Image: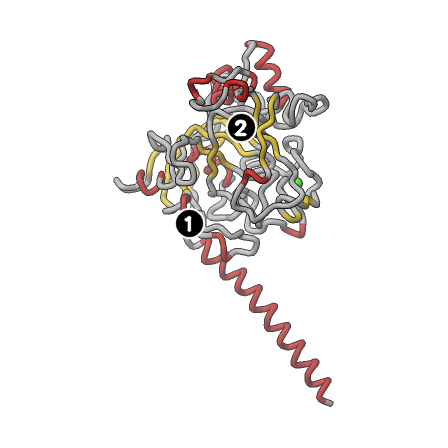
């Protein structure tokens, strides 16, 4: 009865393969986590009653950065070298908004101050030498919903500049934010975010503060909620499912942006520290920021980022750091909802997938 023997052999082989795959995923996580030393929170409790909408982040010493995630299940295809070396960082405690700033909150700011965002202002020809003046129209970057793409190397296949796109009209002049009061404000440039923060007596978080907060007190976890992308098969953040950027199954419930705080908060009570929108940070982006600052040893105390920016993919364009990934990130592309990963963006332009939250120093 060779077919029976063969069937048993096949079942045995499959079982061995499954055990191997599981063991491999588990070992990869153990190895990954082994690169991080424990997070040690400061013992100072919240110094006062929480400002509205904010939570106290205790600060402390933690391992900042991330190990190469590619061996992890759904760890993506990028080594994320700009988030190494993993190094010890100390941050003081601070207040942080539980959510990214919403359209309703930003509208209050604009109403009170008359502030005009970068995307609403005429462009200065001096900033764009060689570009004909009739092309210098205010606008912002909008996801293009392409039907097909050639590879994932050129993001211009799925982004386009849309005249008249701005925070009140995030997809272009015909679009509106009516009914989207609880959605994150988007199409805001870095200086718009800074202006909002200053209006409330706050500031943008440094990358170190943002990452400490995103980890929610955990040590060396790939995600703000723990070790798996979808524990019990449930999505924990608004990212992309399907085939990026042409097929969006919206398995997490959201094809585009989601309102803030629809997924569970992390250990510090912060929502959406992964996915939905990228969040502006205070730091200039530099891929070797960590190597440069540990030259004098670690821990590094309250790092503010480098004094200048460098992005090897666009060397002439200074960038500010962004964190958290967006609804357009998947394990096929970007994967920067993994905690510890880093992003960057041109500070003088807004995008459909970029917002911010603010922090405030303790009194
Ligand atoms: Ca989604």
Report the Cα–Cα distance between label 2 and label 1: 27 Å
Indicate the quadrant where residue 274 lies: top right
Label 2 sits on a secondary structure element that is: loop
Q: Residue at x 60, y 40 (%)?
A: 328
Q: Classify 331 as above or below 155.
A: below
Is any atom of residue 361 visible in this view? no
Seen from the viewer's position, the closer of residues 264 and 276 is 276
Sequence-earlier tag: 2 or 1: 1
Seen from the viewer's position, the closer of residues 110 and 43 is 110
Whether label 1 lies within 8 Å of ligand 1 gets the answer: no
Quadrant of the drawing holding the C terminus:
top left
Q: Residue at x 44, y 51 (%)?
A: 67
Q: Residues within 10 Å of mark 2 (few under 14, many from 20)?
A: many
Indicate the quadrant where residue 325 lies: top right
The residue mark sitting in front, 2 or 1, is 2
Q: Quadrant of ligand 1?
A: top right
Is any atom of residue 298 visible in this view? yes
Quadrant of the drawing holding the N terminus:
bottom right
Seen from the viewer's position, the closer of residues 6 and 173 is 173
- Contact between marks 2 and 1 (CB within 8 A): the answer is no
Q: Residue at x 57, y 50 (%)?
A: 332
Give residue 21's position: percent from left, percent from top.
Answer: 57, 65
Label 1 sits on a secondary structure element that is: loop
Determine which of the numbered discs, if any, sits on residue 356 in the image: 2
Q: Residue at x 60, y 31 (%)?
A: 142
Determine which of the numbered discs, if any, sits on residue 36 in the image: 1
Q: Residues within 10 Å of mark 1 (few under 14, many from 20)?
A: many
């Amino acid at each position: 009865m060779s077919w029976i023997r063969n069937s048993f052999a096949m079942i045995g082989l499959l079982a061995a393969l499954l055990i191997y795959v599981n063991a491999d995923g588990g070992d990869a996580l153990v190895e990954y986590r082994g690169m991080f030393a424990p997070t040690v929170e400061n013992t100072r409790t919240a110094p006062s009653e929480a400002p509205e909408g904010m939570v106290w982040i205790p600060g402390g010493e933690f391992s900042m950065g991330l190990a190469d995630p590619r061996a992890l299940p759904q760890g993506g295809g990028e080594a994320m070298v700009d988030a190494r070396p993993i190094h010890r960082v100390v941050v003081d405690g601070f207040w942080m908004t539980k959510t990214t700033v919403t359209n309703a909150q930003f509208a209050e700011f604009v109403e009170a101050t008359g502030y005009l965002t970068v995307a609403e202002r005429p462009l200065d020809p001096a900033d764009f030498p060689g570009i004909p003046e009739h092309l210098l129209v205010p606008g912002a970057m909008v996801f293009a919903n392409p039907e097909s793409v050639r590879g994932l190397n050129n993001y211009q296949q799925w982004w386009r500049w849309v005249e008249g796109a701005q925070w009140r009209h995030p997809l272009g002049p015909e679009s509106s934010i009516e009914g989207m009061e609880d959605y994150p404000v988007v199409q805001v440039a870095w200086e718009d975010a800074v202006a909002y923060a200053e209006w409330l007596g706050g500031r943008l978080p440094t990358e170190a503060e943002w990452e400490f907060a995103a980890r929610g007190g955990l040590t060396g976890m790939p995600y703000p909620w723990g070790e798996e992308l979808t524990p019990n098969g449930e999505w924990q953040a608004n990212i992309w499912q399907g085939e990026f950027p042409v097929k969006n199954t919206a398995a997490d419930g959201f094809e585009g942006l989601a309102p803030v705080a629809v997924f569970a908060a992390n250990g510090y009570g912060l929502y959406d520290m992964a996915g939905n929108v990228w969040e502006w940070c205070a730091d200039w982006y530099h891929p070797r920021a960590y190597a440069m600052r540990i030259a004098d040893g670690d821990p590094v105390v309250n790092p503010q980022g480098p004094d200048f920016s460098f992005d090897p993919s666009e060397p002439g364009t200074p960038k500010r750091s962004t964190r958290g990934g967006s609804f357009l990130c998947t394990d096929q592309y970007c994967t920067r909802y993994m905690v510890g990963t880093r992003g960057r963006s041109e500070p003088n332009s807004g995008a459909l997938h970029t917002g911010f939250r603010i922090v405030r120093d303790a009194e």
